[in-house]
Amino acid sequence: MKIHLFAFPAAVLSSAITGALSADEPSSFKEQVKHAYLRYVATSSKDASSVTNEQWEELDSMVSEPIIDTSPETFLADCIEEFNIMPVEARSNWQLIVNDFPSIPQESAICMESLYHIFKDNNPNPDATTQDEQVRNDLYLASLNAAYDDLPDEVQGWIQDTSNPRYNVPTKALFPRDADDVVASVKFAKKYGVKISIKNSGHSFTGSSTRKGTLLLNMRKFERYAAKSITECDPNLAFEDFADQPCRLAIARGKLGYIRVGGGENWGETYKALDEYNDKVGEDKFFVIGGEAATVSPFGWTMQTGLGAQTGVRQYGFGADQVLQVEMVLADGNHVLFGPSEWTKVEGKVPQTTAVKGVCKIRNEWTECPEIPFADIWRAVRGGGGGWGVVLSFYLQLHPDLSKENVELDYDCAGPNLSLQRIFFLVKYLHDPTYFEEANALIHNPDNKFDPVTVEDSNKCGANAGTLFFECNGAGAGLQAEKTWAQFLRNWNVLYAGHFGEDDYFTDDQLESLAAHGYCTSIVKYRSQYQALMTPGVVNRFDPEGPNLPNIGAPEIVAAGLYENGIIPRKWLVENDIALVKMLLQMFGVTSTAADLIRNIILYYGSFGVAHEGTSDGMDAVSAAQRKAGFWANMFPKVLHDAFFTDMYGTEEDNDGLFPGYISPNHSTVVVRGPLKDDWGAACPSDETVAWRNEHCFSLQEAIFGTTLLKELELIKEKVDPDGMFTCAYCIGDN
């Protein structure tokens, strides 16, 4: 990156020189100047509100849809109604994204899936920067499961005050219809120094798809590809040009097809396209790995790693691992298509990418590009979050559409509450499946010995907090988990009893009751993945005659409180499961309620697995913590940090001063900070102000990616978007 000192004001250069002179190492001058320049670039772009009407008319003449004025007033007029529907479960995220349901269409470009996400840092309080996290949590509790009209008068006053500086509403919005619209918008933004925000669903827990003073590109009206792009690959095809790249890579990975998904489509629409294709060919042929909530965008989801406990992620890899080819518009206005062109075979892993090739669309033809760092962009867009450009489409590999077997558990069906047993069974079945055969050495009754469970068997199932016990893919996968659970309960007294108090064992009568009640489980079978994801009737309130699209999750006024999504490493969890649970039970009390709390808050999301260390192509931005994860814990800082963090991840000395990263980006919230910079074993205090936490604790981005990967991604951002055109809250190069 070349930096010309005359390119920015003397005051900025003076600040850099002062910082360099005061630094410990004299050689840091160049680094100080570079970061001063980047800060200058990040803050010097023109606010879109300062662009003249004549200039906006210039863009308006080049695009398919009219440019829209957006403001807090239009947000209040278009986006509040859904948040007054009660109960909360009756609300639908479909009504907060652009849709064409005839009865109640939604045309607003700026509605969000959480009301507070339209505000900076998801907080409508004008004094937010002076608050500690307890004040924020009080607001969260007052807003959870609430209707808008029932919010405290003071909170409603903040929201109704359209001059509230916390409003984070773009100045203008545009619905691109095709690639030409996006290219024109990017070139316009470059010409006039305008920043661009990008939105599909608005599902981000950091509110990353809205930004004050930007031109918002809402992709929901962009060209749709899913229904017309499903491609079966011929293994005998003679690959001739770059158009064959998705099939060539799919076949190398052992897949026989792909689907191209457009930048405005969501998972519900993508799943529906595949279901209709399967009906057409007369068999449940294909499925794509995706998100569990239908209105989530495949793009934000994939770029944030892509997790799904019930959608095959543990078996086939993260969302970032599914991409074969990417179509984007970059900050320089180039319309590009790129993906791996060379790879090597490595035992136990998918083909490892060694080269990435791309082409540019010039005069409506794909041709050779100027120098573009395609390998860097390929890495960044798969796990590195947003802010790299406008993604127009992903080409995603397809998998066999296996049947589903969901195992449900009734905790109290036979007398003893089974929450404690569930915790340990989840740990062993999902992350240490060979344990069961090894445990047979301790079991003397041959009738109670475990059947073998392989890693492959384990990877077929995932688990989420809630009523479902296991969500398994493939005929017999749920039945095997259910059978192993029954064997586990019969052997509980031998394997675990005595660790957690005098009442942690089963009596003979209780064991007989458990057996009589089928060990409290039942199995619900589905023909296909799509059928399992359906929630019938939810969308019918909009369009009784229209498509029955799946809808998982209902929009809340506030989406998350103090949750941190800290990752508990798989290896550490397997070796320390008893110590972890004993500590937590001592804290909460040895009760079934406490065990439920541990399961539903601490061991929250079972979307990680052993397979993930082999599903990376070696050139992605998914953190090592996620590749080696056991569970994420929603309340990691309050409950686990001081007791276990350095045991899990090592001290500053162990890591040579490079913070390792331990947060999952999926659903991470704006309040999250890493531990104290000068004491990794101490969680960032929640009773300090936002400003104090920002100064003394690791940033959200460093807590997600770790020091080394974050620096690498920041360098890529400097290469591909040196002016910081693409902006999103808490993305690389922002905040």
Image (cartoon, rainbow, N blue to C red):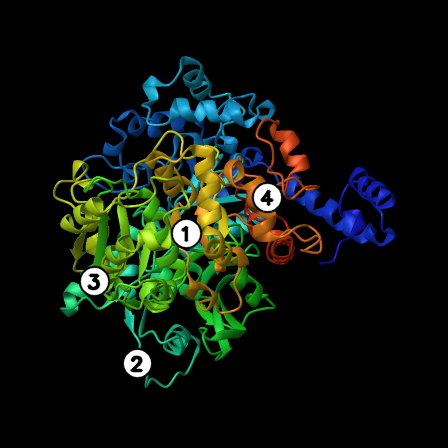
Alpha carbons under labels 4 and 2: distance apart: 44 Å
Which is in the foreground here, disc 2 or disc 3? 3
Element on which disc 1 rests: helix
Q: Quadrant of residue 27?
A: bottom right
- Going from N to C along the chain, the mark reached first, 2 or 3, is 2
Amino acid carrying label 4: it is Asp
Alpha carbons under labels 2 and 1: distance apart: 29 Å
Which is in the foreground here, disc 4 or disc 3? 3
Amino acid carrying label 1: it is Trp
Which is in the foreground here, disc 1 or disc 3? 3
Amino acid carrying label 3: it is Ser
Q: In terms of depth relative to the viewer, which is nearer, 621 or 624? A: 624
Q: In terms of depth relative to the viewer, which is nearer, 356 or 304? A: 304
Q: In the image, residue 587 lies at what x, y percent?
A: 47, 34
Q: Would you say the residues marked 1 and 4 are in contact, meaning their CB atoms lie under 8 Å apart? A: no
Q: Quadrant of residue 597?
A: top left
Alpha carbons under labels 1 and 3: distance apart: 24 Å
Q: Residue at x 49, y 64 (%)?
A: 336
Q: Badge 2 is on which residue?
A: 234
Judged left or right of residue 455, residue 732 is: right
Placement of the N terminus among the 4 image quadrants: bottom right
Amino acid carrying label 2: it is Asp
Q: Quadrant of residue 598?
A: top left
- Going from N to C along the chain, the mark reached first, 2 or 1, is 2
Q: In the image, residue 705 lies at what x, y percent?
A: 57, 52
Identify whether 503 is placed above or below 87: below
Q: Badge 1 is on which residue?
A: 301
- Going from N to C along the chain, the mark reached first, 1 or 3, is 1
Q: Badge 3 is on which residue?
A: 403
Q: Badge 4 is on which residue?
A: 734
Which is in the foreground here, disc 1 or disc 4? 1
